């Protein structure tokens, strides 16, 4: 705890924290411009919670997270306020900017990343979680196969791979 508090008291950490929030606000603004619904209509910190019910209906976080994984974007499915589905199939996704900031990305990169997120979600927007639980297993297996073969997601993944090479992860 003492080491963490010492680091947090440094001016360099304060600058880093401000950059994280600045990038999150840019990313949130771009996601809104791209038609996504954000809980709170933006962010005041490092995290963004996207409500996907307008695109996928209840349970859309599952589809978005799986598609993002295929595209090379890491985020988590997450429940939203007044969640209409179960925690196993939440209706939102949560993303943040600390790792991007650590890698040296700036605001212009957030615009590019928002574009990939929007494209990835749009490439799978026709999927909806079956209300009848008996049909879910087969439906989700088909979804996984379709996503694995999705040309748009493969293109995004290729673009991200080239992009990420400019922002290496440093080993300590």
Image (cartoon, rainbow, N blue to C red):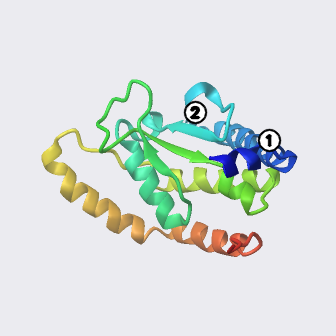
Mark number displayed over residue 67:
none
> Do the residues under discs 2 and 1 have CB atoms within 8 angstroms?
no
The span from disc 2 to disc 1 (Cα, nearest Å) is 21 Å
Q: Could you tell me residue 165's position as x and y percent? A: 72, 75
Q: Mark 2 points at which residue?
A: 38
Q: Could you tell me residue 16's position as x and y percent? A: 79, 49
Q: Could you tell me residue 8's position as x and y percent? A: 75, 45
Residue at 75% in and 42% down = 26
Q: What element carries label 1?
A: helix
Closer mark to the observer between disc 2 and disc 1: 1
Vertical side of 20 occupied by 116: above or below? below
Residue at 33% in and 68% down = 145
Nearer-the-camera pick, 122 or 16: 16
Q: Is mark 2 on a helix, strand or loop?
A: strand
Nearer-the-camera pick, 5 or 31: 5
Looking at the rendering, which quadrant does residue 84 occupy? Answer: top left
Nearer-the-camera pick, 6 or 143: 6
Vertical side of 79 occupied by 134: above or below? below
Residue 75 visible? The answer is yes
Residue furthest right as drawn: 11
Is 136 displayed left or right of 166 in the figure? left
Residue at 57% in and 33% down = 38
Q: Quadrant of the C terminus?
A: bottom right
Q: Few, some or many C-alpha atoms within 10 Å of disc 1 (few <14, some 14-19, many ≥20)?
A: some
Residue 23 visible? The answer is no
Q: Few, some or many C-alpha atoms within 10 Å of disc 2 (few <14, some 14-19, many ≥20)?
A: many
Is 135 displayed left or right of 40 in the figure? left
Precedes in sequence: disc 2 or disc 1: 1
Residue furthest left as drawn: 134
Nearer-the-camera pick, 136 or 23: 23
Q: Mark 1 points at which residue?
A: 18
């Amino acid at each position: 705890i003492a080491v963490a508090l010492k680091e947090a008291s440094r001016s360099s950490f304060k600058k880093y924290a401000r950059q994280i929030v600045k990038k999150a606000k840019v990313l949130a603004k771009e996601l809104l411009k791209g038609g996504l619904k954000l809980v709170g209509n933006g962010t005041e910190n490092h995290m963004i919670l996207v409500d996907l019910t307008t695109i996928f209906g209840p349970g859309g976080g599952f589809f978005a997270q799986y598609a993002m994984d295929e595209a090379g974007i890491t985020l988590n499915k997450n429940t939203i306020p007044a969640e209409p589905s179960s925690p196993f199939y939440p209706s939102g996704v949560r993303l943040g900017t600390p790792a991007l900031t650590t890698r040296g990305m700036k605001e212009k990169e957030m615009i590019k990343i928002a574009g990939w997120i929007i494209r990835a979600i749009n490439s799978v927007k026709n999927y909806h979680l079956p209300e009848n639980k008996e049909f879910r297993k087969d439906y989700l297996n088909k979804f996984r196969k379709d996503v694995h073969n999705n040309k748009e997601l493969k293109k995004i993944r290729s673009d991200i791979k080239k992009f990420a090479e400019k922002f290496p992860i440093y080993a300590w």
